[in-house]
Amino acid sequence: MHRNQSQRHLWNLLLVGWLVAACTAPENKRPDNLLNENQMVDILTEIHMAEARVSRLSLRSIDSSNIAYKHLEGTIFKKMGVDTAVYRKSYIFYSSHPANMEAIYQQVTEKLKKTVDAKSKKKS
């Protein structure tokens, strides 16, 4: 009987510890090699434009679309001089800080609108 109570207390303690860890806010410490917000804006703008290009290709296979996108994504990272791991780490950090990500995406939206407006003026 004493052993069951000890196990129950241990399980309760583990459960409480897990809940505390799960409900803890993300660290505000910026990781090393974090891309700044302007770099994220530039990269995300290019990535969304690449996604649009691939979707306009109307490729029949999802695999073909993925290959085309991965090629464009690699070109973007090379052009920007950014390592994929650094980008992913930065994206995860900003995603866990919604205010920062919202500010980034407001700028991305503005850049995309300017690009669309410039292209529509060229066609006119």
Image: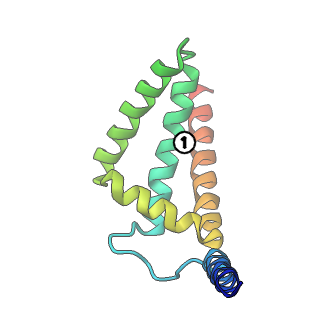
Instruction: Please tell me whether mark 1 sits on a helix, a strand or a loop.
Output: helix
Q: Which quadrant of the view contains residue 106? A: bottom right
- Residue furthest front in the image: 1
Please tell me which residue lies in front, 42 or 14.
Answer: 14
Image-based side of 70 in relation to 96, left or right: left
> Against 64, is 33 above or below?
below
Please tell me which residue lies in front, 14 or 55.
Answer: 14
What scheme was used to colour the molecule? Answer: rainbow
Image-based side of 23 in relation to 26, left or right: right
Q: The C terminus is located in which quarter?
A: top right
In x, y percent, where is residue 19? 67, 77
In x, y percent, where is residue 123? 59, 26
Image-based side of 65 in relation to 75, left or right: right
> Against 82, is 112 above or below?
above
> Against 68, is 72 above or below?
below
Tally the numbered discs.
1
Q: Residue at x 30, y 54 (%)?
A: 83
- Residue furthest top in the image: 60
Please tell me which residue lies in front, 73 or 85.
Answer: 85
In x, y percent, where is residue 82? 31, 55
Neighbourhood count class around disc 1 (C-alpha, 10 Å): few under 14, some 14–19, many 20 upward: some
Circle 1: residue type: His
Which residue is denoted by mark 1 in the rendering? Answer: 48
Q: The N terminus is located in which quarter?
A: bottom right
Please tell me which residue lies in front, 37 or 61.
Answer: 61
In x, y percent, where is residue 8? 69, 80
Q: Residue at x 63, y 74 (%)?
A: 22
Q: Residue at x 44, y 64 (%)?
A: 90
